[in-house]
Structures are given as structure tokens and as C-alpha cells.
Amino acid sequence: MMINRAEAEVDLSAIASNVKRIRAIAGVPVMAVVKANAYGHGLVPTAETALAAGAQWLGVALLEEALALRSAGITAPILCWLNPPGSDFLGAIRADIDLAVPSIQIYEEIVLASQIAGRAARIHIEVDTGMTRGGFLDEWEPFVELIGKSHDDVEIVGIFSHFARADEPRVEQNAQQLKRFTEMSDDLNRVGVEPALHHLANSAATLVDASSHFDLVRVGIATYGLTPDRENLGSSQSLGLRPAMTLRAKLHLVKKVPAHSYVGYGATAQTERDTVIGVVAIGYADGIPRIATGAGVLSHGKKAPILGRVSMDQFVVDLGPASQAKAGEWVTIFSSGEDGGYTADDWSVASQSINYEIVTRIGERVPRVYLQVTR
Ligand SMILES: *Cc1c(COP(=O)(O)O)cnc(C)c1O
């Protein structure tokens, strides 16, 4: 029997509860964004749970993610938005996957694939309203002219864009992007193209800006119970969200070390007093940030801070001189925080990152263990 040294427990009832909360706030259909292995939570179990809880769409970055959902028997509409030229558009059309169109080159490849398939690709026109990343910008006028002339080979399902700073609700750029989105939608209408679905909002905009909801919201991080920005938008708890992932690993060793011992590569930390350290069996190969001073683990209900740098497969924590911890026991690296321990938000602050990166980077070596939805 294989016994795990680390596991990411995913509480599917938390995901279901988050989707229901988002639906209530949004008041329009919800697309659960499940790209990147559902932000580390597991693609298919997350997608099935989100749909059962009332999400009507799934969103992914890559075609292989969309095809994996179809292979799992999922029939809900799926939008896929990161398909460079040369992607298997024919395969996407045959699998009934909606495709983002951010350039004339990609549009032309999708038209060609539709002709070969003998069936219209379902497309969502992606426009750059100020993030300066995906979507039409310099080619917008010629594209409007092109698609206005003829679009028989495709079914134009939607127009969409993405916010750069929705997690900072007070900044002017949000209003500017919203205005530009409406203008670009109007440009299409003027040439007789009227997509049924306008969508712009990510999690942050869904939570705080009803004027951005339009016909559909695309919600990633909030699905997993994490706040898009703890400082500007409040904690998961204050938003009514339940963090779904708890990451645990085993103590590989527990040992007494004297005061003034240097710990780890580069000797960047030193014990202040005689203490007990724990060696935790998970490291940066598993997605733990290499530098996360200020984070740690929960052992016997007490916080044990990290000492020094995280290694590839392990890191060291200060359990304290009176610790009763034993090698082989589980410690919690992050959780919802209800246990008094560290959260993904705490780890993101400690590593100068964001909670998105903390959960998404948990690697393949860490098995996901699911708590099923209880009814
Ligand atoms: C990732 C992504 C989202 C989801 O963003 P969250 O902040 O996680 O809600 C929505 N739309 C697009 C285009 C994305 O790439």
C-alpha cells in the first residue's frame, strides 16, 4: 500500500457552496474557470461539482484542458481562450468547444477548420479594453469590417474582455475598461453582428461591481473559496467564501537542536534558543515557495514558523522547545484558517505572491484527496 507523505485535501462541498454564493451575487449565469487543473484543485472533480452546484459554463485556457473535460463526459458549454495559431481547431469544433478569437490570423484558421468540419465553430470575440494582453487591439477596425461582410462559417456566441485591476475597485481603469467594452460591442452591432453573450467580469468584478456582470461572469479564484485580494476586497470569510484546499505533509524528522544553529542552504536562519525542529516532507518541487519567511505549519494546534529556505523536497520548521510533535505525524501547511493555522493568503504574503499562485503550483507529486459533497 502506498502511504502519502503529503496530500492536498479538496473539500468539494466548499466548492459547491462557493458556486452557490457566486450565483446569488452574480444574478446571471456563471462560468466556473477551471484552467490549470482547476487552480490546482483537480480539473474533473471540480468541474463536475461546480456544474452540479449550478454553474452553467466552464472556462479553460488550453484546448487540452477542454478536451479532457469532454473525455470525462462533461457536455456543458466550455470556452477555451488560449489557442495559438496552429492549434487543433478542427478537433475543438468536433468536440463542441467554444473558441476565443483574439486576432485575424486565429479567426481565419477557425473559419478554415469550420469549412473542413462542415460545421460552424462557436466563437467568442476577445477584445482588449485596456489590459494590453489578450484580445483585439490594433486589428480591431479591419476585423470589424471583415466579420461584418461575412461570418457564415462561424456562430458568434459572445464578445468578451478581461479586467487588469478589478481587485482594486476604486481605480479609474475599471470604468475605462467597461466603457471601452461597451464601445467595442457597439462597433460589432453597427455591422450587424450581435453576440448573445457579453462577458467581462472575473471573480473580483463579480463580487464588487454589478455593472460589469452583463450576461455571464467568469469566476476562477472565488470558486475555490479564495479572495481575489484580501487587502482590498476582504478575507474569504468576509466574502462568504470557503477555502476548499487544505495542504498537509508529514514530519519526516523531529529533533532537538541547540541555540545558534544555522538552518538550511545558505544558512539564512539561526535558532535563537535550544529548540525542537521538524523536517516537513514537502518542498519547492511540490510547489512550496522557496522563500516564504513568515509562513509555517500547524502542529498540535500551534503555529510552527519556517526556518530558512525551503529545499526541493523538504523544509524545516521551529516546533518550539516544549513541542510534543513526533516524526510521522501530519502537519498542516495551509487550510481555511479555522484551525488557527496558516492560510494560502498567509503563504502568499510570506512569498510576495498571490493566493492564486500558492494553490495552482501545488505539483503532481502531491495526491489530491477529495471530501465529497454531503447532502
Ligand atoms: C483566469 C481567468 C479568469 C478568472 O479569473 P479570477 O480572477 O480567478 O476569477 C477569467 N477570465 C479569463 C480570461 C481568465 O484568464
Image (cartoon, helix red, strand yellow):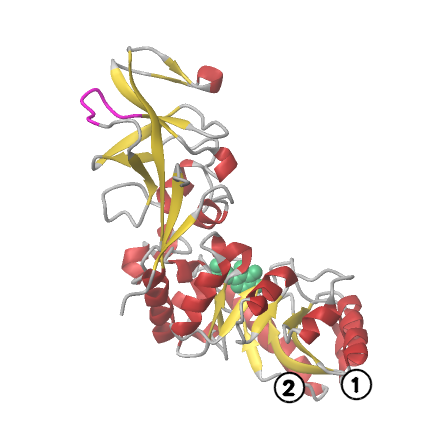
Picture quadrant of residue 6? top left
Residue bounds of the magenta highlight: 318-324
The residue lying furthest to the bottom in this view is: 192
Would you name the residue on which mark 1 appears?
Answer: 150
Q: Which mark is residue 194?
A: 2
In the image, 121 versus 324, the foreground residue is 324
In the image, 20 versus 140, the foreground residue is 20
Residue 241 is one of the magenta-drawn residues: no
- Residue 112 appears in the picture as rendered: yes
Residue under the point 50% across and 59% down: 43
Taking 16 as reference, is 111 above or below it? below
- Marks 2 and 1, how far apart at CA: 13 Å
Amino acid type at circle 1 is Ser
- Residue 161 appears in the picture as rendered: no
For the N terminus, which image quadrant?
top left
In the image, 261 versus 65, the foreground residue is 65
